[in-house]
Amino acid sequence: MRISLPPFMTLSRRRFLRGAGSLVAAYTLADALRLARADTMSMTMPARMTAPTLAAPKEPLLNPTSLTRFVDRLPIPPTAHAAGKRAHPAYPDRMLPYYRMEMRAFKARLHRDLPATPLWGYSGLSPGPTIDTMRGEPLLIDWVNALPTQHFLPIDHNLHGAERSQPEVRVVTHVHGARVPAASDGYPEDGYAPGHSALYHYPSAQDAATLWYHDHAMGITRLNIYAGLFGTFIVRDAEEQALGLPSGDFDLPLILCDRLIAKDGQLYYPVSDDPSAPWVTECHGNAVLCNGKLYPYLDVEPRRYRLRLINVANTSFFDLSLSHEVPFKQIGSDQGLLPVPLTRSRIELYPAERADVVVDFSDMAGQSVQLHHRSEAIMEFRVHDHERRDTSALPATLRSIKRIDPASAVRDRVLTLGELDDANGNAMAMLLGGKRWSDPVTEDPRQNSIETWSFVNLTGDAHPIHLHLVRFQVIDRRPFDLFAWNADRTLKFTGPAQLPPPHEAGWKDTVRADPGMVTRIAMHFEGEPGRYVWHCHFLEHEDNDMMRPYQLLPEQTG
Ligand code: C2O
Ligand code: CU
């Protein structure tokens, strides 16, 4: 069944799997639900199986095909500079570089022919400045909330942490993929109002990787990130530098997100048709921003470039390819280098996932190469004739990654990904392990132990699951019998385990848990004991209970 949607509503089709694992009904958000109801509602549907229905936008939305493509240069976020050196009690014998990152409201043109768009950003930029550090070089960041006291996007006060008793605007910054002590990790409930700040320290005791920072305030993360609160955080190390990969001007972050943009240039965030409960389950844009611009271009030399692709979208995944059959050589994933470069014609990135790629433009002098998301060209590389000599390398092997033996795990936790209708039946919550955020902690691994976690996806969607603090390996995905699970919680596999493809066989911090599958990961809980979180990185889900605290307990001694 295919439902035709207005062009701005590229909402994915979601299915409810019930009973014998059969496809009972398909539905989408929005008007599609009403359109579809007649022919898809079957007798077995629960009476209140309704997703929030999208309200029609108040402002007419931009038709992105009306914009001239490739007229704006791709912005490269500036590298953040330390404001000085400071002492910190966690590092008694050294002075640390001290950065000040002020979150501010500002306006920026997303495209030459659009009026300026009100945004929020770190240092008044979106993406914010790139933080660039070396392994073993800790740093301090003062995250300063200089935002207005009123939000410009629709808060849902029914969501946990976003009650009317809370300051409307709150922020707390998390560096995604960083191994950071709990007090500096950006715990969602540590959000603070304008006029306040938080000084965090980052040990940088981890392998080179493309990380990113973003807001994580309880119940409004989806709105704060949508407003523009994100940036790149790069960790480098000597091992990686010794490989001679493209560096300097030839090593660029490419941060992708989609947004709904109104004709007047304003960001539009979708709401349900119930003004007292505006939350919606998904947010998909009508246009893709590359480093904050619509359809930008970049002048490049005919040589190799390293691009650090980061998906910072709320719910959309990107299906990326290059024109002229130019391949990506994927060299890294979420947590740094893969064992060997992989030649890939397409790269799929779920929210929060990263792919480091090398693109070789040396055969393309004088031509233009477009980056596509699905069939749409979202940016253009203009390859010039002249070049400085390309002294970069792309070695055949990058690093060795020792596989974690699942048999060494002290514990396998079976954790469901599920959905729940609320009492009104029109605003669903999303649950992990059948629990809400506010339920007592259930995941309490020991420091330095190895565990495996098995995500049993009971929903009809893939969910990108992220753990703070630790990097992990994907062990396998295996289809299971949903009927048997629903009947008495037994996990009955219906097919063989599928090993991750090579691009998912490096270190990860976010994994796609597919519907109908048990996705199993393994990790070594290195890091400081304390309270962290794990969650779905669909920001709408994360804000509506698809996030759980976890407690890293001190190592058992003796
Ligand atoms: Cu990208 Cu909990 O975060
Ligand atoms: Cu989810």
Image: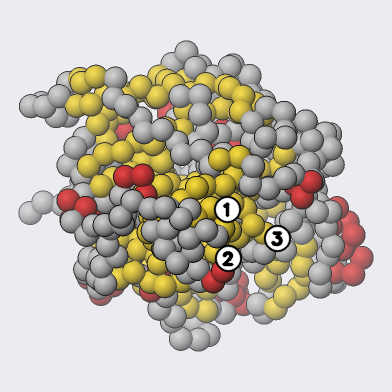
- Residue 230 is tagged as none
* Image point (74%, 44%), residue name: 67
Q: Is residue 303 above or below residue 116?
A: below
Q: Which residue is mark 1?
A: 380
Q: CA distance from mark 3 to mark 1?
A: 27 Å
- Residue 323 is tagged as 2
- Residue 12 is tagged as 3
Query: Is 236 placed left or right of 309 in the picture?
Result: left
Q: Amino acid at mark 3?
A: Ser
Q: Is residue 53 above or below residue 150?
A: below
Q: Is residue 105 above or below residue 210?
A: above
Q: Amino acid at mark 1?
A: Glu
In this view of the protein, which residue sits in the foreground, 228 or 196? Answer: 228
Badge 2: residue crowd in 10 Å (few <14, some 14–19, many ≥20)? some
- Which quadrant of the figure has residue 303? bottom left
Element under disc 3:
loop
Percent x, y of residue 180 = 28, 40
